[in-house]
Image (cartoon, rainbow, N blue to C red):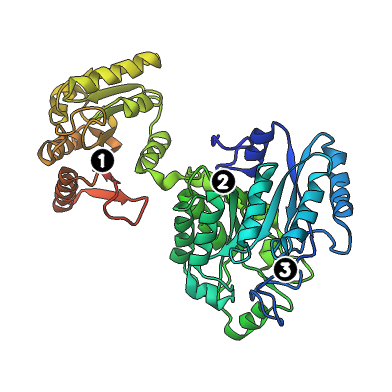
């Protein structure tokens, strides 16, 4: 189970975050504070926004806040009588009013029974200095979260959808809020007109660089009586299929920092107003498919943060209980320990006595006794394991230097290529070699020499990267 989930999700769930924060079940109650929006003037506004200003499922603005709150609370209490609530001001821009008005509405909901926090949906260009001062004070008295609409990091798209602000405005707003220690949740939309897969991924990668606490991921809805409806009819731009959306969201989850809480992974427009895509009406089905795809991949939120996550995934999926495997560079013993829990026998090499001692200690602590430690270079693998010719299932190399040792002592391309040559003769029919390469000077030389050797000898290999940065660590999987 992913560590930030209590219900077998592979991402950092809002339920997990709130339950751990308040030690009880917590629900968000959507309210309509009857606010307007600075971007909704003379019939303009974001081209996708309905007349309800993103508050299709908020309360009725004709009702007072207590009536709206009690209406939803009564339904929840039938099933969960002992719970707490977060008042969520959802419709339109909920900081677009004089501070005196904000105080009246926000302070009122704090008096409602069992309200432990407030979420305020707004825009990055709608928080004045005076408003920020009030929000800072409010955050000291309740669990306050500001939800900012970004939709995309790309200024050209922001202009196309008539967003009314640019990325710099958004980044500055996040900075101002975080300087006051106010929690920030960001809304993004997948499938905006003419955006590519890379552009959607870029938005998540940009948010990873900011100090945000949560994210909401939506699919673009084409709603009746919006400018987007006309634009869609005129251009027939591509709307993501359900399958495309699921794949993109899973890729975004793999990229997203694991500490960022995922508040939403899809949305459903009002049925009577939705033109396309109609598959979004089946919200539960979309969420289930996201769960299934992540499970199929074996991945989770933040998976791409380290290539070693890919290595561990291959270990878990490839190694069988009866296998004999080799850790050609045992280092501090983490790989050796992982292998010992999956395989029948493990042989672990390292030229440094310190590495052997570190590994021996971690194995003893975890009561693993199926490992043979060899204090010698892996290039002599054939000498020590000659009786296992064609019997080894996996050999793994984690190149470079011992993290806690002398960084001048490291693997080198000559001994590594030699070890791979000899290791290939030890593999059984299904056997593989994994080589994790690093971007320091010797590491680049090693990787180049390994790839040249494999290419020249027509040996099948595959390269895994978890980033498009060519200077990041990467994995080579080799099959004879």
> Is residue 478 or residue 32 the one in the foreground?
32
The reply to whether residue 149 is visible in this rendering is yes
- Of marks 2 and 1, the one in the foreground: 2
Q: CA distance from mark 2 to mark 1?
A: 43 Å
Between marks 3 and 2 in the image, the one whose residue lies nearer the viewer: 2
Give the residue displayed 40% in from the left and 26% down from the top. Answer: 342
Local secondary structure at mark 3? loop
Task: Judge from the rendering whether residue 415 lies leftward or rightward of residue 363; answer left or right.
Answer: left
Q: Is residue 3 above or below residue 263?
A: above
Q: Quadrant of the N terminus?
A: top right
Looking at the image, tell me whether mark 3 or mark 2 is earlier in sequence order: 3
Task: Give the residue drawn at x 59%, y 72%.
Answer: 163
User: Horizontal and vertical percent for residue 29?
Assistant: 77, 50
Quarter of the view holding residue 176: bottom right
Q: Residue drawn 44% across and 61% down? A: 202
In the rendered image, which residue does mark 2 sit on?
Answer: 181
Residue denoted by label 3: 53
- Expressed as whole percent of the image width and height from the top left, the position of residue 92 reads 72, 65
Determine the CA span between mark 3 and mark 2: 28 Å
For the residues bearing labels 2 and 1, Cβ distance under 8 angstroms: no
The answer to whether marks 3 and 1 mark residues whose Cβ atoms lie closer than 8 Å is no
Q: Label 1: state its secondary structure.
A: strand
Q: CA distance from mark 3 to mark 1?
A: 52 Å
> How many residues crowd mark 3 within 10 Å: few (<14), some (14–19), many (20+)?
some
Which of the numbered marks, if any, corresponds to residue 435?
1
């Amino acid at each position: 189970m992913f560590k930030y989930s209590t219900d077998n999700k592979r991402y950092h769930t809002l339920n997990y975050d709130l339950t751990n924060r308040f030690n009880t079940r917590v629900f968000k109650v959507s309210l309509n504070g009857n606010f307007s929006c600075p971007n909704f003037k003379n019939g303009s506004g974001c081209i996708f926004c309905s007349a309800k200003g993103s508050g299709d499922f908020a309360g009725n603005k004709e009702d007072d806040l207590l009536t709206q709150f009690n209406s939803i609370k009564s339904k929840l209490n039938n099933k969960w009588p002992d719970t707490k609530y977060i008042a969520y001001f959802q419709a339109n821009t909920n900081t677009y009013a004089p501070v005196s008005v904000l105080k009246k509405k926000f302070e009122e909901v704090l008096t409602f029974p069992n309200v432990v926090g407030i979420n305020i949906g707004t825009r990055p260009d709608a928080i004045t200095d005076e408003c920020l001062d009030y929000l800072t004070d409010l955050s000291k008295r309740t669990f306050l979260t500001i939800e900012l609409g970004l939709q995309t990091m790309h200024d050209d798209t922001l202009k196309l959808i008539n967003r009314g602000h640019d990325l710099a405005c958004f980044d500055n707003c996040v900075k101002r809020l975080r300087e006051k220690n106010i929690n920030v949740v960001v809304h993004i939309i997948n499938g905006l007109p003419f955006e590519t897969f890379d552009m959607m991924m870029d938005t998540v990668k940009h948010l990873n660089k900011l100090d945000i606490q949560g994210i909401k991921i939506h699919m673009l809805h084409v709603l009746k009586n919006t400018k987007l409806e006309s634009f869609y009819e005129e251009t027939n731009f591509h709307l993501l299929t359900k399958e495309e959306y699921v794949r993109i969201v899973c890729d975004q989850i793999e990229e997203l920092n694991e500490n960022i809480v995922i508040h939403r992974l899809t949305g459903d427009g009002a049925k009577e107003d939705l033109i396309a895509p109609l598959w979004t009406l089946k919200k539960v089905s979309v969420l289930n498919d996201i769960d299934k795809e992540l499970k199929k991949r074996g991945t989770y939120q933040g998976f791409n943060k380290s290539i070693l996550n890919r290595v561990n995934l291959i270990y878990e999926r490839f190694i069988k209980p009866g296998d004999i495997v080799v850790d050609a560079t045992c280092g501090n013993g983490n790989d050796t320990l992982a292998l010992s829990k999956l395989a029948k026998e493990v042989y672990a090499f390292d030229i440094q006595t310190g590495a052997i001692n570190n590994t021996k200690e971690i194995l003893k602590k975890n009561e693993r006794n199926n490992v043979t430690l060899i204090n010698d270079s892996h290039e002599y693998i054939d000498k020590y394991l000659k009786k296992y010719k064609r019997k080894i299932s996996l050999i793994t190399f984690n190149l470079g230097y011992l993290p806690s040792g002398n960084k001048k002592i490291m693997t080198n391309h000559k001994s590594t290529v030699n070890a791979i040559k000899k290791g290939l003769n030890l593999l059984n029919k299904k056997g593989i070699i994994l080589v994790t390469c690093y971007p320091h000077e010797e590491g680049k030389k090693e990787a180049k020499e390994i790839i040249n050797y494999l290419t020249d000898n027509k040996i099948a290999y595959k390269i895994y990267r978890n980033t498009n940065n060519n200077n990041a660590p990467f994995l080579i999987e080799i099959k004879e």
